[in-house]
Image: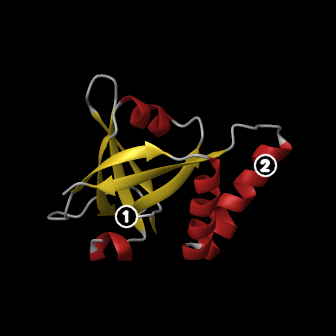
Amino acid sequence: MPADLDAAKYVSFVSSKKDGSPAATAVWIVPFDGGYAFTTDADAWKVKRVRRNPAVTLTVSDVRGRVAPGAVVHHGRAEVLEADAVRRVDRAIRTKYRVAYTLMIAPSNLVQRLRGKRNGTGAIKVTLVD
């Protein structure tokens, strides 16, 4: 497992749109079952893109997804995880990002539940191929 990804606070996750152009999103990642995983809305565009094309990249970034010059680009294959694995990834994210999760994600989840939005949380795992 690459040390830069293990130590990263944010990672630029890049998947491909239908037309082949890249779509980058900054995500929190955790080591998970021989790869790296992150949570997302179950109906997020990145989930749809991964189902269409599992070839992705991960690069250490800042909170806005900006990648430093010379940063290592890690190629991988992504998969959308099932419910049991999603819960495990969510627990790992809550543990690694405890304060930020409590301040940012937990209130958002509460608001969604209060509004009756039931799309739920999904998770994506990336297994590196480089």
Q: Residue 100 carries which label?
A: none
Q: Relative to 116, is 93 on the left or the right?
A: left
- For image coordinates 54% across by 37% down, the residue present is 44
Point 37% across, 60% down: residue: 11
Q: Which amino acid does label 1 sit on?
A: Asp
Q: Where is residue 21 in the image (x, y as percent from the top left)?
A: 26, 31
Q: What residue type is labelled 2?
A: Val
Q: Mark 2 points at which residue?
A: 111
User: Residue 60, relative to residue 124: is it above or below?
Assistant: below
Mark 1 or mark 2: name the one nearer the start of the chain: 1
Give the percent coordinates (x, y) of residue 108: 71, 53
| Residue beneath the point at 47% across and 62% down | 28
Residue 78: x and y, percent? 38, 46
Of all residues, the one furthest to the left in this rendering is: 70
The answer to which of 6 and 28 lies nearer the viewer is: 6
Looking at the rendering, which quadrant does residue 90 occupy? bottom right
Q: In which quarter of the image is the C terminus?
A: bottom left
Figure quadrant of residue 59: bottom left
Q: How many neighbours does mark 2 have within 10 angstroms: few (below 14), some (14-19), or many (20 or more)?
A: few
> How many C-alpha atoms fall within 10 Å of the one at disc 1: few (<14), some, or many (≥20)?
some
Residue carrying label 1: 62
- In the structure shown, which secondary structural element does the residue marked by tag 1 occupy? loop
113 relative to 11 in the view: left or right: right
Residue at disc 2, secondary structure: helix
Count of numbered tags = 2
Q: Tell whether 11 sits left or right of 43.
A: left
Residue 1 image point, x, y percent: 30, 71
Residue plotted at (27% across, 59% down): 67
CA distance separating discs 1 and 2: 26 Å
